Each structure stands twice: as structure tokens, then as C-alpha cells.
DNA sequence: GAGTGTACTACAATCGATTGCAGTCGCTGG
DNA sequence: CCAGCGACTGCAATCGATTGTAGTACACTC
């Protein structure tokens, strides 16, 4: 194919004007064109292998059929499934996905969003929200639909697809309680992120509700979702509270940090001290012992975010509700009956 | 901002014609415009917050400033860093990244590429090549630059950025040989993928070169890069060849499958039988024992692929060389001195 | 047979930028 | 005093589609 076939070629081939060809090719307007003509145009288009030029169409209709997505950290295996879900759901409606990454210490995270907007994406999916996020406010005034995914914010009211952290932590705490644990600690994630904050609050609520011993001394905040901070926090926690028999970590990596801390102190994970994680990331089932953890349906989360976005894009009265997907508990060797 | 500012607005504001404004705004043509006029236009553009409309520009210049990338499996943590590298390198030149996923059993994988081409991406990065890939041939005739990443093909000659599997397997074999291992087995990946084939060939070459015992009975092919196939293959291998003291796996997941098989047979990983992996994916360092594995610079790989693509896009005589990035060995507890 | 629908189809403007070509203006040299 | 040149700047076409409006042809009514 030397030269791309345009609408004009199709029209000439079918012996009609381009406008007629356009209408024949378009689902919405097909009905105004004579059936025989439609057939002729369709046949010609098919024979020439015509595909509309997205830029020309977009320029006229003011739509790019493209959605932008901002990821805080592509190296984190968490986001693969989310992106996969988004991409899949968008594809079903003919939309494509533009990916942008705000690395851990990006000099100007907002510029990433601006770039996407300058590209005239039809909608935005943000996985980067912080609880106190200033960009989001300025984005509200823009006329571009937004959906948050995985993390939400408190600054503004935006549609968000999240994991149900309250339920998830509940699964972990109930599981531990059923095993006889009474003194349970929490290695929290960064409280500046909604996930960190929510899981912390859920932990306090559930332990309280179940009549377990828990005050602020049961909790230690890690400053980042990584193994090392988890190690440091778990160590501090266990030193302060030697009576703890179980730890609920806000994240799998933190839980694995806790593994290390527990071993450092000469104890065995699962037997002496039980540990639960959160996310069920790849390979944690193969740890020694396998990590009991809360599984969040990340792919569904992405798909749901995409569907909500598409919905809000086509509607003049967007839904701004938060959806919380129900997690499951994957029970493995890292939790066991309380040592007597 | 109710209405977007266009070039016309800037031109009116600066008191010039749109064509002059366009030239003043464009690096290439700025020199033909009077310096004072340029300043006036620039100032106006800045004041109005002008950003060119990418569709209008693209329609005229026939460029979308967009690159498409096809991933075989977004759930695989391997691809995060590659995508990150690509996105980063593209961003430096003002290009954006359109992501498409061909899931494991996608009904029509080629349609994904076609969609990207219909979107008029300026270039393509494919992480999906199989050794015997028919689509690639048809793509060659198209006029769109392509770069392969991670996997290559034998069907056609295309630029590719790969890991140096020969060197990587060499690192593993040499390491084992230095520990005294003589009878080494190989759990190969799918030989239909270039990585599977190349690592297999490299294994044979290195063991031969070093005078180690190795024929086809030392090798067992797994039919997919996953833990379970690794388990099955390792088990068969060890049953057939009880004399083996070490296993070189073509991939970390296969290696973890081998862990299981070894334990099933009542032996200890590292002490009785050494195991090496490939990729150094997240968390394998935290396994028990930590997996000795070949670390491939995936982020660099992505960045390099993007750079090569941009280069080939701007040049009329594209480079079609294959680049192989040098891997490193991460030594951990899964390899040890041969048992005597 | 004039008038009025009906059912299509063609014309032409438009989206917002880029770019070849054609001025315009001032100044210099013959 | 005018041709001619240089340095800008403006005009208008163009990229490929969509869409409001106008026009044509035909049938049907009275």
C-alpha cells in the first residue's frame, strides 16, 4: 500500500459524494442513506481496505478516542493487572490507552497530567492520587472526565474504584482472631496515601469491634511500601510490644519486611508470630512460609475504572460514587494458631 | 478556561497572521521571522497559555508523536520496567506511548497491531515476537519503523534490543563450574520463543566449551514460563538424571518450580542441588533460599529500544542491528559448593 | 397540472495547524 | 529615478473527515 486510502477514494469508487460515503459508513447516520447506496459504499470501503484517519476525524469531532492513565510506579507489579484491565475494557469500546509514569521522585508530577491533557485525551484514569492532592482540584475545573483507581483523595469528590480496605483488613483480623490471637499489631503504610490511612483505620475499628487489645502502641507506620521500611517498623513494633503474637501488615512487601524482623529476633513466622499481608502479589505464595494475604481483584479494578470512565464520558451527569471491590483472603502458612 | 486557545487567538493577540505565528512558534522556521515579531508572538502565546492542537498538527504533518507498544502479558512483572524505560525515553523527545496487550490466548493477536497502525502511530515497539512470526513479514512492507524488544525473530531482519542470553547463561554455568559442579541440567523455556531457544543453545555451548558432561538428556523443555511447568520439567529431569548436582533454569519462575521438585524429592536447594534462575524478578531475593539469578537490565532495554526507534524514525536509512545488553549475576543462597 | 411532501444526495464550511508562493516595503546601486 | 534585492509577512491551499443546509427528482394529492 503506497498511499493510504481516504474517504474520497471510497466515494469516487462508489460513485457518490464524500459526505454520502461518510454517512453510509457511520452507524449513526446510515439510516438517512439509501440502502443500495450504503451497500455500494460499504463494498467499496471494504475492497479498498479503507480505515478512517483518526486525526482528521478527531479534529472534526473533537474526540481522540484515547484515554490517558497515570501510574505512580511502573516497576511495581501491582499495576500490571490494573493496566491490563483498563486496556481490555477500553478496547471493547474502541478506545486506546496512553500511559504515563510518574516515577518515585519525579520533579514535576503534574506536568505528566498536563501533557496528557494537551494531547486531548478524552478521559483520565489516575492511580496516583494522594490523600491531599492539589492537582486534582485544578483538574476538576477542566472539562475532562476523571476516575481514580486504587487510591482516592479527600480533597475533592471524584469517582473512584478502590479495594474495600475495611473489609480486607476485617478478613485478616477475623482470621487471626479465630486462630486465638488477641494481641495483634499493625505495620501501617504511609498515612499520606488513602490505602495506608484506610487500612490503619480499619485495623483500629476491627480490633476495637472484636474486643481485642489495641491502641496506638499496636501500630507502627512505615514510610514507604517496601521491604526495608517494613523491616524497620516491624522491628520497632515488636521491641515495643513483645506480647504481640500477630502482625497485620498494610501490604505484602511490608509483611515480608516483618518476616525478616521476626527471624532477626529469633522467632518463627507462622509458629511464633503470625503475619498477614495485603495484595497477594506474585510469588508471595512461594515464600517460606507462604504469605497469608488479602487478595484484591486488581484486574477487575482496572476494568471497572475504565467502564466507569467511559460511562461518565458519554453522560452529561457523571456518577461520582466510590466503588469498593470485595477482597478475598488467601490463607497460607504465615498464620497459625496462637502459641500457648 | 472555557474555550481552548488556538493559533488564531495568539496571532490576533500579537497582531500577525496565523502563518507568521506558526513560524514564530516553530523552532525550524523561527529564523525567517523578525526577532521582534517572534518575541511578540511568544509572549502572546505564553500569556494565553497556548498549546498547539496535536490532531490539527498531526493531520497536516502526518505525525502523531505517538509510539505504539505491544506487550504479550501485562500481568508479567517483567514488562513493568521495560515499559517504564520506553516511556521515559520517549518522553524526552516529546513522544507518548500507546499500550496494547495481547493476552495469553488472544483470539487475533495481529488485530492489536493493526489497530495501532490504524491509529497512525509513528513507530512500533514489539515485545511479542515469536521466533517464527508471520505478522512481522507483512509489517516489513509497511512504512512504519519497528523495533523488537526482549524477544527477537528469525523470520525477518529487524532491529532488536535484547538481553545477551549467551553471556547470561555463561555467567550461571561458570559460577556453577567454579563451585565444582560437573553434572548440570537445564530446564529450558519454550523453544518457540527466542529466549528459550537462545538460552538452551547457550547452555549447550557453555557446558561443551567447559568440558562438562552435557547432552540432550541434560535438558528438559518447559512449555510455558511458569512455576508449574518448571516443576514438572525439573522433576522429570531429576528422575532421569539423578546424578545432576545443579540446574540452570531458563527463567526465575521455572527455577522456583525446580525448588518445589527438589524438595519433593527430599533434597535441599543450594545444599544438595544448586539452582540458578534468569531475570531477577522482584521477590526472588527473598525466597528461601534466595535465588541466584541472572539480572537483565530491563529498564535500560526499554529505554534503548525507544531510542533506537526514535533514531530510525528520523533517519531514512534505519539501523537494523541487534543490540544485546550485558547481564549480571546476582549470587544468593540457591547455589553452593557441590556436595561431596 | 400546479403544489407539496418525501427521500435522498451534493455542496461547502469547518476543525486547527503547516507551508509554498506571492506580495510588500525599504533601501541600495547604477 | 528606477530596477532589483533582501527581509519579512500575508494569502490561501491543504491534511481527511463530519455535518448543516440546500437542492433535485419523483410520487402523490387535489
Image (cartoon, coloured by chain):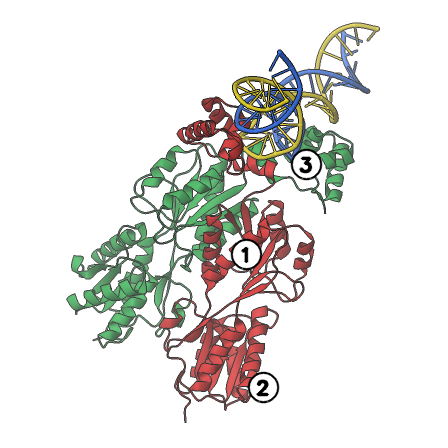
Chain colours: A green, B red, C yellow, D blue
Q: Which residue is mark 3?
A: A25
Q: Return the residue nearer the eye: D6 or D27.
A: D6
The quadrant the C terminus of chain A occupies is bottom left
Q: Are marks 1 and 3 on the same chain?
A: no
Q: Label 1 neighbourhood size at 10 Å, few (<14), some (14-19), many (20+)?
A: many
Circles 2, 1 touching at the beta carbon (< 8 Å): no
Q: Label 3 neighbourhood size at 10 Å, few (<14), some (14-19), many (20+)?
A: some
Residue at image coords 73%, 29%: A17
Give the image location of residue A300, x and y in percent: 46, 53
Task: Give left or right: position of A152 versus B51.
Answer: left
- Quadrant assignment, res A294: bottom left
Q: Are marks 2 and 3 on the same chain?
A: no
Q: Label 2 neighbourhood size at 10 Å, few (<14), some (14-19), many (20+)?
A: few
Residue at image coords 43%, 67%: B281
Task: Give left or right: position of B218 versus A265.
Answer: right
Residue B217: numbered disc? 2
Is B50 situated above or below A201? above
Disc 1 is attached to a residue of which chain?
B
Gap in angstroms between the C-alphas marked 2 and 3: 60 Å
Task: Give left or right: position of A35 versus B214.
Answer: right
Q: Which residue is mark 1?
A: B308
Disc 3 is attached to a residue of which chain?
A
Residue at image coords 57%, 62%: B160
Amino acid at each position: 500500500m503506497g498511499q493510504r486510502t481516504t474517504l474520497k477514494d471510497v466515494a469516487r469508487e462508489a460513485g457518490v459524494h464524500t459526505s454520502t460515503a461518510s454517512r453510509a459508513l457511520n452507524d449513526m447516520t446510515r439510516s438517512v442513506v439509501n440502502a443500495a447506496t450504503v451497500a455500494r459504499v460499504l463494498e467499496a470501503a471494504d475492497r479498498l481496505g479503507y480505515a478512517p484517519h483518526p486525526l482528521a476525524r478527531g479534529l472534526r469531532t473533537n474526540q481522540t478516542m484515547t484515554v490517558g492513565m497515570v501510574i505512580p510506579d511502573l516497576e511495581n507489579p501491582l499495576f500490571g493487572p490494573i493496566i491490563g484491565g483498563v486496556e481490555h475494557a477500553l478496547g471493547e469500546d474502541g478506545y486506546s490507552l496512553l500511559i504515563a509514569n510518574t516515577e518515585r521522585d519525579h520533579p514535576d508530577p503534574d506536568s505528566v497530567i498536563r501533557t496528557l491533557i494537551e494531547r486531548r485525551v478524552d478521559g483520565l484514569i489516575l492511580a496516583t492520587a494522594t490523600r491531599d492532592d492539589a492537582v486534582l482540584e485544578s483538574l476538576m475545573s477542566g472539562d475532562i472526565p476523571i476516575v481514580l483507581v486504587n487510591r482516592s483523595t479527600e480533597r475533592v469528590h471524584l469517582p473512584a474504584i478502590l479495594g474495600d480496605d475495611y473489609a480486607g483488613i476485617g478478613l485478616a483480623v477475623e482470621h487471626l482472631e479465630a486462630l486465638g490471637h488477641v494481641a495483634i499489631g499493625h505495620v501501617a503504610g504511609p498515612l499520606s496515601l488513602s490505602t495506608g490511612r484506610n487500612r490503619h483505620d480499619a485495623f483500629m475499628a476491627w480490633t476495637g469491634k472484636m474486643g481485642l487489645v489495641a491502641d496506638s502502641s499496636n501500630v507502627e507506620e512505615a514510610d514507604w511500601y517496601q521491604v526495608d521500611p517494613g523491616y524497620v517498623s516491624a522491628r520497632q513494633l515488636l521491641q515495643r510490644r513483645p506480647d504481640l503474637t500477630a502482625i497485620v501488615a498494610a501490604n505484602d512487601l511490608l509483611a515480608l519486611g516483618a518476616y525478616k524482623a521476626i527471624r532477626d529476633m529469633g522467632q518463627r513466622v507462622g509458629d511464633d508470630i503470625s503475619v498477614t499481608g495485603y495484595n497477594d502479589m506474585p510469588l508471595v505464595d512461594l515464600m517460606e512460609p507462604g504469605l497469608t494475604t488479602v487478595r484484591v481483584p486488581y484486574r477487575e479494578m482496572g476494568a471497572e475504572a475504565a467502564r466507569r470512565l467511559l460511562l461518565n464520558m458519554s453522560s452529561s451527569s457523571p456518577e461520582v460514587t466510590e466503588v469498593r471491590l470485595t477482597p478475598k483472603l488467601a490463607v497460607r502458612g504465615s498464620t497459625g494458631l496462637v502459641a500457648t
